[in-house]
Image (spheres, helix red, strand yellow):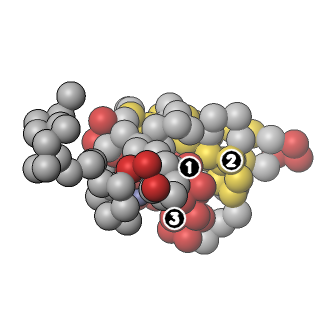
Amino acid sequence: MRLFEGTEFDIPPTCDRCQQPEANCQCPPPAHEFLPNDRQTARLRLEKRKRGKIVTLVLGLAPDETDLPKLLTSLKNTCGAGGTIGDNAIEIQGDHHDRISKSLAEMGYRVAK
Ligand SMILES: [Zn+2]
């Protein structure tokens, strides 16, 4: 029950974004909120793949808590390397452990030693 409900002072709740009464609101649901970077701990691991190729894995960041595609793009730029999103991990081609560790720390992530 709202204050003033049923009186002439009653104002139906409106959407903060479109200012329409909530009943008429067509806004998409609010964007998913990710966990703040400083509440997440990334773990880095080097892994050897077929034909001796090394990839740097960024583990420990859950897809529903981190914008992994965005982070992937950022890390690819930082390392100048290709990469992909694997099984709950970001994979960057090559050994970029130190660079990724530094970059994640700069973004505010905690990085497990
Ligand atoms: Zn709306």
Residue occupied by mark 1: 68
Residue occupied by mark 3: 74
Quadrant of the rendered image holding ligand 1: bottom left
Q: Position of residue 75 (x, y in %)?
A: 53, 61
| Residue 44 shows in this picture | no
Give the camera-side residue of 4 and 30.
4
* Mark 3 crowdedness (10 Å alpha carbons): few <14, some 14-19, many ≥20: some
CB atoms at circles 1 and 2 under 8 Å apart? yes
Give the alpha-carbon distance from disc 1 to disc 2, as whole Å. 7 Å
Residue occupied by mark 2: 85
Give the camera-side residue of 31 and 9.
9
Q: Position of residue 19 (x, y in %)?
A: 32, 64
- The residue lying furthest to the right in this view is 51
Q: Quadrant of residue 2?
A: top left
Q: Position of residue 33 (x, y in %)?
A: 40, 45
Q: Is residue 72 above or below residue 29?
A: below
* Mark 1 crowdedness (10 Å alpha carbons): few <14, some 14-19, many ≥20: some
Asked whether mark 2 and ligand 1 are closer than 8 Å, the reply comes as no
| Residue 7 shows in this picture | yes
